[in-house]
Image (tube, rainbow, N blue to C red):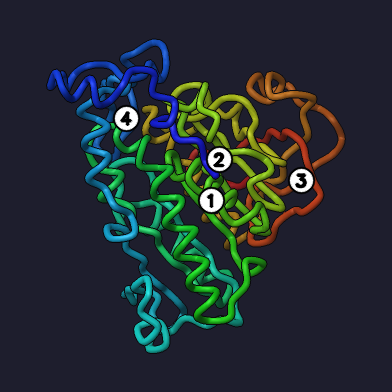
Amino acid sequence: MERSWAGLIILGLAAASAHSYDNEVLLKLESPRYQHVQGPDGLHLEDLWLKVKDQKESDQYEPERDNAYHLFTRSNPKTSQPLVLGSENVLKASNYDEKKRTIILVHGWRNVATSNFNALLVPAFLQAEDLNVIIADWSIGAAGNYVVALLNVFKSAKAVAGFIEWLNRTSGSKVSQYHLVGHSLGGHQVGIIGRHLGGKVPYITSLDPASPGWNLNPNRFQSTDGIYTEVIHTNAGLRGFLPPLGDMDFYPNGGVEMPGCQDLSCSHHRCSFYFAESLKTGGFTARRCRNFVEAVNQQCNLPETAQMGGLRPKTGKTGIFHLRTNAGSPFSLG
């Protein structure tokens, strides 16, 4: 079970509420306190210390009620079929096929079901293979200020895992059929979902998992969250997490600033473009590094190579890898 930051509160919530100190600090999540965090509309200067009002706002989010799940298949590639937790009739009337693999997509902060992350990956997966693609829309929990969304990551992850368990019980699908993919805050959420499912998901992909609020966070993405876990870093040390987290970690172009990008937002989101292209064409041959410092400095020269991303897990493989890309599509150099 996840250990929420809320469970580490060092000042009594009841006492704070009694004094109506909405701005009273409950927990110093990270230092420095004020950091720029990437949202879909640009950078925001956010207070990363947990306050009473943040906890109150998070308490209003109930993911079992507020999350939505949108199914796409080759029979409905452009218009979703909403799946409703607990509604067997809705599931039976949908195009969900229990015999096929299922992809769960988890977006990041202030994103919604129609954000670029989902718009890129839904058609890429369906082009690559006949499968079920489900968008886990936790936009109600991901809205608002960053610390509230940070708290809601844990709550949403538990609910998404519960949805998957219900889907399996109702349809006969198995955990072995799943691939979880998340970006930024969603990049950590997919790990927590995998933990709730016993670390048995065959393939979990974390795309530039968020850095602010996660450096000291015990619930960040872990290599043991699934049978095979992969991380693609494209804004490492800035909006994205710098050190390796998965079985295999890829640092394209050093993992910090991507060719063709003029700002941090572009680099933070470029991982989704790389991954979408990898699904359709393969490509993206990377070279093994001794450590992530070599990867960031683009000084990797070990002989072993591996493919970044792709449809299938590289089960049993581990390591840190570097590669170069083009500045525009097609991004792969091969």
**Label 3 is placed on what type of residue?**
Ala
Residue at position x 52%, y 81% from top?
171
- Could you tell me if residue 334 is visible in this image? no
Earlier sequence position, callout 4 versus callout 2: 4
Identify the image quadrant of residue 49.
Answer: top left
Identify the image quadrant of residue 5.
Answer: top left
Residue named by callout 1:
330
Question: What quarter of the picture does the N terminus occupy?
Answer: top right
Residue named by callout 2:
326
Q: Please state the horizontal and vertical placement of residue 293, each as a whole percent of the image.
A: 68, 19
Q: Nearer the viewer, residue 170 or 72?
A: 170
In the rendered image of this protein, does residue 290 appear above or below residue 101? above
Q: Tag 3, which secondary structure?
A: strand
Q: Check if mark 1's residue and mark 2's residue have beta carbons within 8 Å.
A: yes
Residue named by callout 3:
306
The numbered dot on residue 147 is 4
Residue at position x 59%, y 72% from top?
101
Tell me the distance, in whole angstroms, between the alpha carbons under discs 3 and 2. 18 Å
